[in-house]
Image (cartoon, rainbow, N blue to C red):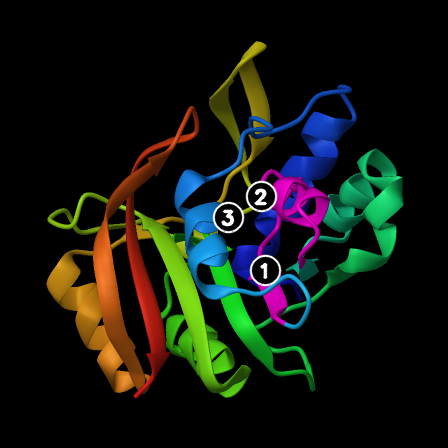
């Protein structure tokens, strides 16, 4: 039985069958800024959790960084390999909640993934994966949808159900997904409990898909 957070695989398959992308092919500015400030192209090993259709991976790989881009969705990884054949070897399927992975990284980043995890156990597992896969002096950038004040959570039992959603092509029927937005106090408490120390935080955006993202740069506490 699939977990609720796997619903995006259905959504990608449905929208790709129409010959379209789900998200815009525009990178998230805060990601490249953090990588440029903290990573060396020659030696830093970088992991992306939840690469989706490759909006950030493309820019980072083209810039020459050593990136391992992952996603739980087989469809998303297949799409990235087909659209970026030059970097096909840099993409792989990974479930950071239940999967196994034996590599440690100098830098890990994740954009708009944690807000899809609504169960506390899954959110804790996500943070633990990051902590456990950082090198001793590694850093991680986590971006989640939210304004720092609002709290909101959807019903995970409705994941996979067809829903009408806005798309650049108009209204489309695609698999429903989950969302949990948290405030700064909740977000910071989660990170602290997971053994992650926040060294920078703020609000940013990833237009046109996310007009408000909370971000934190963390290291092992």
Q: Which residues are magenta?
A: 44-65
The tag on residue 56 is 2
Kind of element beneath mark 1: strand
Q: Position of residue 217 (x, y in %)?
A: 33, 65
CA–CA distance between discs 1 and 3? 24 Å
The tag on residue 159 is 3
CA–CA distance between discs 3 and 2? 26 Å
In terms of sequence position, does the residue under pointer 3 or pointer 2 come before the other? 2
**Vertical relation: 34 (above or below) 219:** above
Q: Residue at x 48, y 76 (%)?
A: 130
Label 3 near label 1: C-beta < 8 Å?
A: no
| 185 left or right, relative to 211 | left
Label 2 near label 3: C-beta < 8 Å?
A: no
Kind of element beneath mark 2: loop
Q: Foreground: 20 or 14? A: 20
Q: Image quadrant of residue 172?
A: top right
Q: Image quadrant of residue 188?
A: bottom left
């Amino acid at each position: 039985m699939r977990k609720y957070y796997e619903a995006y695989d259905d959504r990608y398959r449905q929208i790709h069958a129409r010959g379209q992308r789900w998200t815009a092919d525009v990178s998230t500015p805060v990601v490249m800024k953090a990588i440029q400030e903290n990573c060396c192209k020659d030696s830093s090993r970088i992991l992306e959790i939840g690469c989706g259709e490759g909006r950030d991976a493309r820019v980072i790989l083209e810039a020459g960084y050593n990136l391992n881009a992952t996603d739980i969705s087989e469809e998303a990884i297949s799409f990235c390999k087909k659209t970026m054949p030059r970097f096909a070897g840099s993409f792989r399927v990974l479930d950071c909640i239940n999967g196994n992975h034996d590599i440690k990284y100098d830098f890990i980043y994740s954009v708009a993934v944690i807000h899809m995890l609504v169960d506390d156990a899954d959110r804790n597992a996500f943070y633990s994966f990051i902590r456990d896969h950082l090198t001793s002096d590694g850093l991680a950038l986590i971006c989640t949808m939210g304004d720092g004040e609002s709290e909101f959570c959807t019903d995970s039992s409705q994941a996979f159900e067809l829903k009408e959603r806005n798309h650049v092509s108009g209204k489309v029927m695609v698999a429903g997904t989950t969302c949990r937005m948290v405030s700064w106090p909740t977000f910071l408490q989660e990170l602290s409990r997971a053994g992650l120390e926040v060294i920078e935080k703020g609000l940013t955006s990833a237009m046109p898909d996310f007009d408000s993202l909370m971000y934190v740069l963390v290291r092992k506490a």
